[in-house]
Image (cartoon, rainbow, N blue to C red):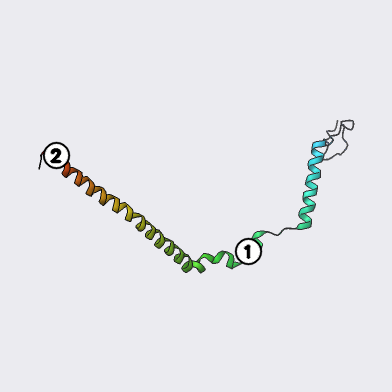
Amino acid sequence: MAIQVYGLINNDSEDKDAKQEKEDFDSKVLTLFENIQQKIVKALNPGAIVDKATPEDYEKNPIEDYEAFRLGIVSGVDFLAKQLNAALDVPKKIVKKTNKTFTKALNDIGAKLVGLE
């Protein structure tokens, strides 16, 4: 009695009557989309981004070229902001000064009415 290993040494299968697997409709649709995608990729052949990079792209920071311009803009905006804040502080100071004067006048009148002075 000889032992036979099917599929490795001897290709004669005992399961010739076994039902073969078939591709379902969903799988056929996905295979169709995959084939279309592969054809598009082959047709367009997009190159890798890394291959297109030059040493200048990663060695130099382009912002450094505009550093003086950027600092000028920042300084200008800072100056305008300080001027605007100073202009808005003037009415506050006037109101505080007027309020203190008015309060002092009312205190003096109250003190005379009560007889403290």
- Kind of residue indicated by mark 2: Leu
> Residue 3 is drawn in which quadrant?
top right
Pick whichever, 32 or 91, lies toward us.
91
Q: Is residue 106 left or right of residue 65?
A: left
Residue 99 place in picture, x, y as percent: 26, 48
Q: Is residue 65 left or right of residue 80?
A: right
First in sequence: mark 1 or mark 2?
1
- Kind of residue indicated by mark 1: Ala
Residue under label 1:
53
User: Quick check: can you spot residue 38?
Assistant: yes
Number of marks in the rendered image: 2
* Residue located 27% across and 50% down the image: 96
* Residue located 82% across and 40% down the image: 28
Residue 68 place in picture, x, y as percent: 46, 69
Residue under label 2:
113
Q: Give SS at disc 2.
A: helix
* Residue located 66% across and 63% down the image: 52
Q: Nearer the viewer, mark 1 or mark 2?
A: 2
How crowded is the residue under tag 2: few (<14 C-alpha within 10 Å), some, or many (20+)?
A: few
Q: Is residue 82 positioned above or below 19 on the image?
A: below
